[in-house]
């Protein structure tokens, strides 16, 4: 078998890349270890920046998102029982974010891919990469007890944090930066109306909480929990009781509870791989970097990687230039580090770090006091939350 690009992983990065390449007439095969249903059962991101929604439009899959997604022009910070609204629209000169679940983005991309009859192999086992340091890379995989070989020009590693692509790179060729946080997020999804029209990020002395949503009838809530907690220890009732304790009176009065339809614990990590290109192998999305979810940046950074990678590959085939390929890593990393910094900072600001002693909580409160009462502080938070412009920090041409 032969194709131009083998994409490993059918999460949002891989599917979006496949769609953008297809639009430009570049051939790709996607190899996914799991089944399509399994991929759709993972509950993850909920907030999309405008850069991401623009890209989904460009890929031709934005129609349902515009119909069903919720535009949010602000969010709330509930700090030690007192609410503050971050008015994104006013603070950023008219920008907002879109609340539309990653599951729905993935579903839309899957549907577009199957409508265009594009090849995706689900249940591809033991994917192995070879010769990506040459101009003739090869990918093998197993399915139904048979081994398949694909010759290609490029490999796109869109296989997430635990994937095979990053692991295939010789250790001496790669530098990894990592911070693991001393807590996780326990998430609960329920078919109940959200407690508030907008998201609420909660700093309470019992730990962080987040009130998010997927639609007007589906809520997503998170609680900061110790890393040693197991999801089985948390009954729905225990979750709702703890959330009530972290909310204010208004939140407690408005909270509608119900049975969970999904509950899971996610660890929090900051992680970046440098570089993101190794010969003819590229890493994109969670395969190359992870952010703690507090800033809602993971999927949005994945989308920009895919934008730059699709542009580079399309230019390679159409204009016979490898300039985009050579720039890929550096172009992505600049934006990634900005997203990493914001996500780390917002995590530090909102969570309880019990090992750091009482002075840490005092510093945190002093910082929140400054930010929430300073026009510049609020603007800094807002412009990072909606996403800095793609050309941020680049010299202006003229
Ligand atoms: P994914 O989604 O992990 O997909 C990778 C795919 O690769 C497959 N795979 C393999 N396939 C073949 N062979 C192998 N050896 C393979 N190994 C793995 C996997 O099965 C999978 O299907 O990575 P991708 O596509 O890069 O997408 C990244 C996003 O999923 C991630 O960044 C976001 O979910 C992060 N995130 C958020 N991002 C946002 O922008 N906004 C948010 O509001 C937001 N909230 C979140 C989040 C992540 C969370 N968790 C669970 C960490 C909230 C949470 C709780
Ligand atoms: C979510 O809805 O899953 C979500 C929203 C905002 C975040 C993180 C996760 O910052």
Image (cartoon, grey):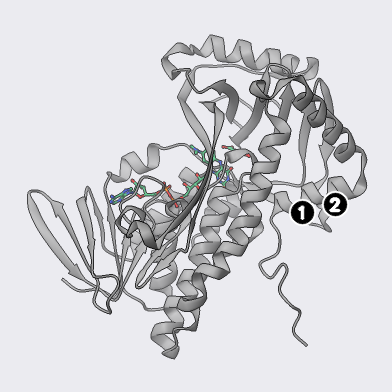
* Dot 1 beta carbon under 8 Å from ligand 2: no
* Tag 1 residue: 383
Of badges 1 and 2, the one in the foreground is 1
Give coordinates of residue 18: x percent, y percent.
Answer: 38, 65
Q: Is residue 289 above or below residue 152?
A: above
Which element type, helix, strand or loop, lies under badge 1? helix
Please give left or right for residue 187 compared with residue 15 in the image.
right
For image coordinates 46% across by 71% down, the residue present is 310
Of 240 and 365, nearer the camera is 365
Lateral position of residue 27 relative to residue 303, left or right: left
Quadrant of res 52 = bottom right
Quarter holding the N terminus is bottom left
**Image coords of residue 306 (percent x, y):** 48, 64
Residue at mark 1 to residue at mark 2: CA–CA distance: 7 Å
Q: According to the image, label 2 marks what residue?
A: 91
Q: Is residue 260 something that shows in the picture?
A: yes
């Amino acid at each position: 078998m032969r194709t131009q690009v083998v994409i490993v992983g059918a999460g949002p990065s891989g599917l979006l890349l496949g769609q953008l390449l297809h639009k430009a007439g570049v051939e790709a095969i996607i190899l996914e270890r799991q089944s399509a249903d399994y991929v759709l059962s993972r509950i993850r991101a909920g907030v999309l920046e405008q850069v991401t929604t623009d890209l989904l439009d460009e890929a031709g899959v934005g129609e349902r998102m515009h119909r069903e997604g919720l535009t949010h022009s602000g969010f709330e910070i509930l700090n030690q029982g007192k609410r503050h609204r971050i008015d994104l629209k006013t603070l950023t000169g008219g920008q907002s974010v879109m609340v539309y679940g990653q599951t729905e983005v993935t579903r839309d991309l899957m549907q577009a891919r199957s409508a265009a009859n594009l090849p995706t192999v689900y249940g591809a086992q033991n994917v192995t990469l070879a010769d990506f340091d040459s101009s003739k890379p090869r990918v093998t995989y197993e399915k139904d007890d048979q081994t398949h070989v694909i010759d290609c020009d490029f490999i796109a590693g869109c296989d997430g944090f635990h994937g095979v692509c990053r692991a295939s790179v010789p250790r001496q060729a790669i530098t990894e930066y990592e911070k693991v946080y001393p807590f996780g997020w326990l998430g609960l999804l329920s078919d109940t109306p959200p407690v508030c029209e907008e998201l609420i990020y909660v700093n309470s002395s019992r730990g962080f909480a987040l009130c998010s949503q997927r639609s007007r009838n589906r809520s997503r809530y998170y609680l900061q929990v110790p890393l040693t907690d197991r999801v089985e220890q948390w009954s729905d009732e225990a979750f709702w009781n703890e959330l009530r304790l972290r909310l204010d009176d208004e939140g407690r009065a408005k909270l509608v509870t119900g049975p969970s339809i999904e509950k899971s614990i996610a660890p929090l990590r900051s992680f970046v791989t440098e570089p993101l290109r190794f010969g003819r192998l590229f890493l994109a999305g969670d395969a190359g970097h992870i952010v703690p979810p507090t800033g809602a940046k993971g999927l949005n950074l994945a989308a920009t990687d895919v934008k730059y990678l699709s542009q580079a590959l399309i230019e390679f085939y159409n204009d016979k230039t490898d300039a985009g390929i050579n720039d890929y890593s550096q172009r992505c990393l600049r934006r990634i580090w900005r997203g990493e910094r914001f996500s780390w900072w917002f995590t530090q600001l909102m969570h309880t770090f019990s090992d750091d002693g009482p002075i840490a909580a005092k510093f945190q409160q002093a910082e929140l006091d400054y930010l929430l009462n300073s026009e510049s502080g609020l603007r800094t938070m807002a412009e990072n939350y909606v996403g800095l412009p793609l050309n941020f920090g680049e010299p202006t041409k003229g």
